[in-house]
Image: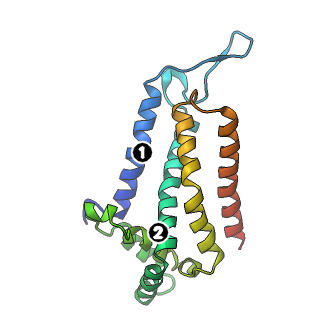
Amino acid sequence: MSLLNVGSAIALYLFFTTIPAISFLGGHDTINVNYGNDNSIGDGTRGAGGIASPLTISLLFFNNLNIFIALCEICLGRNISYIQHHYKKLRSLYSPGNEWQACLSYLTMPLRIAQLFTNGNHWMSQMWSTYALYDPSYQNQESFGFFIDYGNGLSTIPPSIFMQVAILFPNKVSALWVGCVGLAMYWQVLYGTIIYILS
């Protein structure tokens, strides 16, 4: 098994995008707001001793994961012909009930550093051809699953980055904007997920 494969590339991305942000938060003083009593309430990003709170760590991790998935969703829209071709190849290799073997094969597929940044990003596109073994709508550009995910890919990266900035620099962005953008983005993600599960 190669040291760099799809699974380790995803893990490294999440590590190198989340841990520095958590370290940044831990190295800065808590900004306190006094609400008219003797109890100072922090900005919610740090717990006791300047350590990032579990909620903050969860949001940082989720937003970074969402950005990665959005990039993959953009590949879904851009490379649908490749996904359809690769899906047919996988369908001939893995019979129904053995989809998990295709998932394991995908996650352990060796990658070279150069492949991480190639224009086609076929390793990201193969996520969809593999997932299409469970839900064939992801290799069909006329399906709801295709459109909702491709649309999410195009629309969720800017708000996810905005939320990361708001967590790291709470005094640099308006709380009203953070609330509005966060509500809209997380509602879109929740709504799309619920409709997908129910469809």
Q: Amino acid at mark 2?
A: Cys
The one nearer the camera, 105 or 165, is: 165
Give SS at disc 1.
helix
Residue 73 position (above or below residue 130): above
The one nearer the camera, 98 or 37, is: 37
Give SS at disc 2.
helix
Q: Quadrant of the C terminus?
A: bottom right
Query: Is 98 positioned to the left or the right of 40 in the image?
Result: left
Q: Amino acid at mark 1?
A: Thr
Scheme of image coloration:
rainbow
| Residue 151 visible to the viewer | yes
The residue carrying mark 1 is 17
Residue at 72%, 70% (x, y): give it: 198
- Give the quadrant of residue 140: bottom right
Real-space CA distance between mark 2 and mark 1, rounded to the nearest whole angstrom: 20 Å
Residue 9 position (above or below residue 83): above
The one nearer the camera, 120 or 145, is: 120
Per the rendering, the mark at residue 75 is: 2
- Give the quadrant of residue 178: top right
Q: Position of residue 157 (x, y in %)?
A: 54, 53
Q: Quadrant of the N terminus?
A: bottom left
Residue at 42%, 76% (x, y): give it: 102
Q: Residue furthest right?
A: 36
Task: Tell me the crowding category of disc 2: few under 14, some 14 to 19, or many 20 or more residues within 10 angstroms, Cα based.
Answer: many
